[in-house]
Image (spheres, coloured by chain):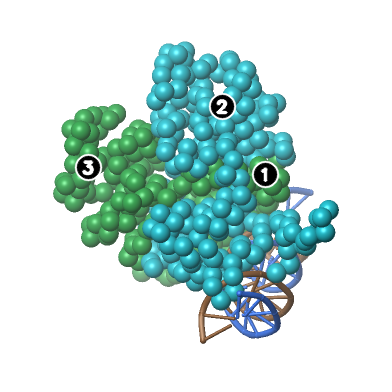
Chain colours: A cyan, B green, C blue, D brown
DNA sequence: ATGTGTGAATCGCTTCACAGCT
DNA sequence: AGCTGTGAAGCGATTCACACAT
């Protein structure tokens, strides 16, 4: 265990979370899976779990689990494993899931509308506060308790609701222009459903969601029965 | 160029596509991006492109582009680059996008319903033929030209429409049981929107789509401004 | 002269294996 | 004895760099 020990003013030492150095995207998405699984385990009343057991549920190796966690500190007890709810909370803190995020959706089409009341979001601190569209026939209508606002009022609305994250559910042809517009606001992250790479300033984070691409990958792997690790049977 | 030359009965040699050996998931998703971009380029009337230019659009390196393609053959001309429409067609063949796939959606909730007429699907050979739900109040209703069928009639329906791929848009708690049921049919692939790992026989392929997980990753990267390659600005 | 195709080198993620804590 | 935490080894993916085709 290498967590930094630091003298407090009172002279006591306290365990300080190691500065996460170079954490890969893969590690982050695995943390997200551990978090979800730990929630399930808690609901089942399971209070303890070893890296071996957790790995088995996810389909990873136990070393992978321990290595992932080791980037952020040491949360287990040798000989005992991890406390389910403690580990859950630690991961929530690492990932910023114990705070709440204000999210807006731009694009009130099929996808945008479907995400407005997606339960999985609210449950983990992502609150959909606003929905925008540039189609005047949609503006003013209600989608699951949210009133569709005109894109003209975007900047104003983002500020009013203190939006942190925007979900882009608009056509690919309009995505970059919208990203440029968002870059001038206080929005910090974009989840982009348009199948188009976005160029954003380095202060912003983009994640890409591309359902058609997943279907295409399915098509390839069905035709080329090369088992990839993530497709493996338990 | 190492494509195998094989004598035909008539004595002529024909270029035979190399058997794709160990193609990673990353390569396949990149192919999908090239394919999309090449479609755009064709529409813009651009007939030629170099690996360097293509890489710049995607945010990869030119060596990456050439290496990805080299798994399947050699499609360019030294000194000249690639013919846009030829490369597009080659990739379509590799990925199975020049045939058509019959797709069913199980779960007529927000996500399932939103995907019924997702234009990006039909454009590339994925035809949504059927929509199932176990909620009797939904069965018989029409969602964008499809009539919701009861899950009781699943197997029958899958056979009638010769479904190859199923999109699972049902709660996590029901996902594994449904996957087990699909394993007994002729369905070859599942695109799973439930945030739960599916165990399937090795003859089936699963791809996972998890929007909440993407938001969680956004959360992490916003809080830890470590630039990952995929977030880089052009 | 230009830009592909590809072995070789490099990089980074995963797994091994074991010291050390409980 | 049991299981974590982690340097080191292993391995797969990316990048380099150049011979070769046009």
Q: How far is disc 3 from disc 2 in space, using C-alphas?
A: 37 Å
Query: Quarter-wise, where is residue A174 in the image?
Result: top right
Disc 1 designates what residue?
B223
Q: Nearer the viewer, residue B125 or A104?
A: A104
Query: Quarter-wise, where is residue D19 in the image?
Result: bottom right
Residue occupying the point 50% across, 30% down: A128
Q: Quadrant of the C terminus of chain A?
A: bottom left
Disc 3 designates what residue?
B134
Which of disc 3 and disc 1 is earlier in sequence?
A: 3
Q: Nearer the viewer, residue A20 or B77?
A: A20
Q: Are marks 3 and 2 on the same chain?
A: no
Q: Quadrant of the N terminus of chain A?
A: bottom right
Percent across and percent down for residue B10 are: 37, 67
Q: Are marks 1 and 3 on the same chain?
A: yes
Q: Nearer the viewer, mark 3 or mark 2?
A: 3
The relative height of residue B211 versus residue A180 in the rendered view (above or below) is: below
Disc 2 designates what residue?
A174
Whether residue A205 is visible here, answered yes or no, is yes
Q: Are marks 3 and 2 in contact (CB under 8 Å)?
A: no
Pointer 1 chain: B
Q: Nearer the viewer, residue B126 or A175?
A: A175
Q: Are marks 1 and 2 on the same chain?
A: no
Residue occupying the point 46% across, 69% down: A53
């Amino acid at each position: 265990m290498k967590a930094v020990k630091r003298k407090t003013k009172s002279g006591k030492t306290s365990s300080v979370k190691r500065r996460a150095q170079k954490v890969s995207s893969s590690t982050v998405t695995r943390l997200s899976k551990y978090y979800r699984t730990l929630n399930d385990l808690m609901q089942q009343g399971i209070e303890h779990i070893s890296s071996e057991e957790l790995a088995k549920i996810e389909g990873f190796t136990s070393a992978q689990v321990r290595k992932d966690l080791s980037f952020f500190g040491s949360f287990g007890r040798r000989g005992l494993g991890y406390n389910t709810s403690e580990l859950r909370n630690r991961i929530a803190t690492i990932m910023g899931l114990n705070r709440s995020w204000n999210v807006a959706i731009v694009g009130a089409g099929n996808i945008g509308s479907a995400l407005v009341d997606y339960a999985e979001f609210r449950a983990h601190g992502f609150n959909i506060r606003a929905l925008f569209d540039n189609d005047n026939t949609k503006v003013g209508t209600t989608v699951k308790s949210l009133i569709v606002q005109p894109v003209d009022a975007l900047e104003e609305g983002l500020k009013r609701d203190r939006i942190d994250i925007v979900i882009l559910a608009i056509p690919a042809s309009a995505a970059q222009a919208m990203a440029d517009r968002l870059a001038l606001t206080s929005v910090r992250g974009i989840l982009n459903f348009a199948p188009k790479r976005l160029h954003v300033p380095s202060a912003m984070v983009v994640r890409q969601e591309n359902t058609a691409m997943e279907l295409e990958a399915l098509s390839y792997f069905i035709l080329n029965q090369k088992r990839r690790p993530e497709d493996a049977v338990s």
